[in-house]
Image (spheres, grey):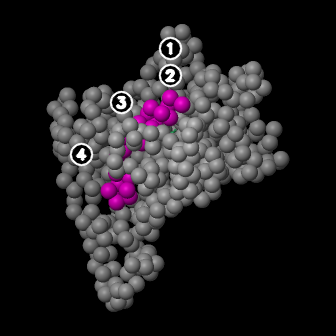
Amino acid sequence: MALSELLADMESLPTLAWVSPALTAVAVILVALFSGYRKSPKGFNVPTLGEDSQMRYVQEADFKNTIFQVLTPDGPRLFLPRKFANELKPFKRHEASGMKALADRHLGHYTTIDHESDVMLGAIKIDLNRNLGLFVGDVEQEVSHCFKTNFPSCEEWTPVDLHETLLRVVAQASARIFVGYPMCRNDEWLECSTKFALDVMTGGEKLKLWHPWLRPFAQYWIPEMRQIRGDHQRALDLLMPELKKRAAEARQPDAPPRQDMIAWMQQRAQKLGDKSFDYKELANLQMLTATAAIHTTRLAIIHALYDIAARPEYIAPLREEIREVTRDTNGILQKQHLTQMRKLDSFMKESQRHSPPSVATYQRKAMIPIDLSNGFHIPKGTIVQCNTNILDETPAAWGEPHAFDGFRFYRLRENPEDTNRFQFASPSYDSMQFGFGNDACPGRFFASNQIKIILSYILSNYDIKFEESVKGRPKNFMFEVNVMADPTVKVLFKKL
Ligand code: HEM
């Protein structure tokens, strides 16, 4: 962190207003000097790659069969060949934890995301998944409302920044199920629940620049770190009127049961006898759920739209499938239609195969010492991640591994024995974009539905293409192990 940046941050720090300027300057200089200090982390006896290695790792096939490490100030990160995911799979979450690995990666102890909740996991895994079908019409309505109120009219070809516009669409459509109507249209809530994730990511990255010993102090200098605490309070304040309204409603005899994530979390907490669950915890869990759900889903839609715009030959068959499956309801989406959209499902899966959320979607923190079959010892506390994006290892039956074949999974499912396999939301050893094993993403069915509803809305209402200047599919770029869509590209939309 540059000293000037640090000083600018400090100036805006109200709690230090009483400290004399001279003392503050000394403190800043000492802290800045110390922050440059890096104790070289103790590593393993395996090849070590430099800081840029995670990008190279994806490209270098040599590492398919080799364990290697990247040294970070927080200790070595071990990269394992994909086959080891099979060995780690049987371990329970208290032995090899995906959540803890993720929390550590974003300094969750400071950024508040190191918070595992049975209430939240149960509400997603059981209640959300069981009730998904109820919401297809509601979500479609929200998507349509959002496009009508927040999207340019697109009477002519109009450039659209998908990163920005889809954030609102996905946030509002998700909030319909997370906090219900009318809260899902509350601008402040949508802003708060989406900004929290960005504060966590940015705050965590800025804090990582500081030596671990200095982080307890440095957290107060970083604006995003301070905002995280504000985000939690603001979420509670914004939700409070809705929660009070519901509490009053529940006291009425014959009050109809609510169906949304607020209600499911409250019911789960009661079932589990969770005494620590209160309005504050509920607001925190809503923020965590939104964090897991919104940016991942938005990114998958952006990748799919880039893939469609780069390959316009897919537009007609996808549009035809949507028209065909919704013929019986005059274009109104129903639950069964989403299952029937097999070409769209296949396209989404192929898009995700080429542009996964990360090249290490299977990561675990060893909560106990673990020995691999090759004799490699993983000490307790180590974070390991598997290379989950090796296109070369695509099974031969799937066809040309490197080609973009939007309907490859559609064709594979034509085999009667495989009709329920190869779906977007089916993780497997060869398809780990949603992780793998018992702790694979519990929100994948929800994400699959949301993406289908949003993509089918776009395909049914707009023509899309890239600006002339864009040649081919824009290249993704990497941030650590994460795969990002090029944010500088705009897609042109024109109303049908
Ligand atoms: C396209 C969208 C999404 C992608 C690509 C994605 C990807 C992932 C991945 C790779 C994991 C790690 C799995 C593992 O370690 O094996 C994960 C975990 C998780 N995801 Fe998602 N996710 C998406 C959408 C969602 C949504 C919509 C929700 C909530 C409704 C959600 C909630 C979670 C939670 C709570 C976990 C942690 C599960 C656990 O620790 O047991 N995700 N996700």
Label 3 residue near ligand 1, CB within 8 Å? yes
Segment tinted magenta in the rendering: 107-131
Label 2 residue near ligand 1, CB within 8 Å? no
Where is residue 122 drawn, in percent x and y? 41, 36
Specify the label residue 438 is tagged with: 3
Q: Amino acid at mark 4?
A: Thr
Q: Of circles 3 and 2, which is in front?
A: 3
The residue that disc 2 covers is 422
Residue at the location (79% across, 48% down)? 154
Q: CA distance from mark 3 to mark 4?
A: 20 Å
| In the rendered image, the vertical position of residue 304 relative to residue 338, given as above or below | below
Specify the label residue 382 is tagged with: 4
Dominant SS type (magenta): helix
Q: Amino acid at mark 1?
A: Asp
Q: Of circles 1 and 3, which is in front?
A: 3
Where is residue 391 drawn, in percent x and y? 45, 31
The residue that disc 1 covers is 418
